[in-house]
Amino acid sequence: MKREFAVIGLGRFGGSICEELSMEGMKVLAIDKNEHKINEYKNIASHAVIADSTDEHALKELGIKNIDHVIVAIGDNIQASILTTVILADLGIKKITVKAQSDYHEKILNKIGAHHVVHPERDMGKRIAHSLISSNILDYLELSEDHSMVEVMAGRRMRGKTLVDLNIRAKFGCNVVAIKRGKQMNVSPSADYIIQENDVLIVIGADNDISRFEKQLV
Ligand code: ADP
């Protein structure tokens, strides 16, 4: 069954969400106050309408209450993003995802009823920074304020060794939760698992432990 989404703000971020959801066959209502944006997306989204999302009446007229999931992707105008989120929360929208511009903005959005706050520029910056530390760091994901998960290619220092030899938990306080070998995923690898070249380790831990692990072993 097709799920209904609304994307408010069709800048680079909102536009890309709108395109991707539409390509995946989802029903998307695209909203922007800028006519040019609406012309750009009218053949991509199921519906594209010019509206100012800080106008509660306009949102009601669009039937926003019947939408399962609303994504607020207003860029620089923090005031408009906050006001839109308050209106959506007041209308009882079940799922509201909002793009934050700063940590301060993120805090406010969480307080006023956003269900999920995304911070794409900051997150992408962090992921890229970690991949710059070593080309063996394939991905980095923030799990909470002080815990992360990294995906690392087995480096020279790991190859031919078992998890016992590397003693990652005792030395760094991190846990190897899975190892990918080609297409095979080994969840909870045993202590005598011998690491080979091209194995990818998925490691979870506190940020400072992950950081020591990255610097010393990856
Ligand atoms: P990005 O950083 O993702 O490119 P932009 O700031 O360039 O984001 O784009 C945000 C979009 O949100 C713009 O197309 C703008 O017209 C739209 N927008 C801003 N405020 C409102 C509003 N109150 N109602 C509807 N659309 C809005």
Image: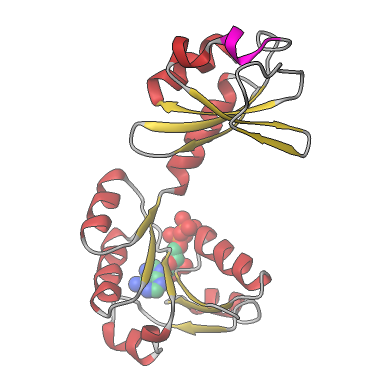
Q: Residue 92 versus residue 182: which sits nearer the camera?
A: 182
Q: Residue 198 versus residue 193: which sits nearer the camera?
A: 193
Side of 119 relative to 133 (left or right): left
Side of 152 relative to 66 (left or right): right
Residue 163 in magenta stretch: yes
Residue 171 percent location from the top left of the image: 46, 9
Query: Which quarter is ligand 1 in?
Result: bottom left
Q: Residue 39 versus residue 155: which sits nearer the camera?
A: 155
- 16 above or below 65? above
Snapshot quadrant of residue 27: bottom right
Residue 178 percent location from the top left of the image: 60, 32
Residue 139 percent location from the top left of the image: 59, 34
Residue 205 percent location from the top left of the image: 43, 26
Q: Residue at x 56, y 20 (%)?
A: 133
Q: Residue 55 versus residue 216: which sits nearer the camera?
A: 216
Side of 78 relative to 155 (left or right): left
Q: Residue at x 53, y 17 (%)?
A: 214
Snapshot quadrant of residue 192: top right
Snapshot quadrant of residue 76: bottom left
Task: Write down the region rendered in magenta.
Answer: 161-166
- 39 above or below 130? below
Q: Residue at x 27, y 72 (%)?
A: 89
Residue 204 in magenta stretch: no
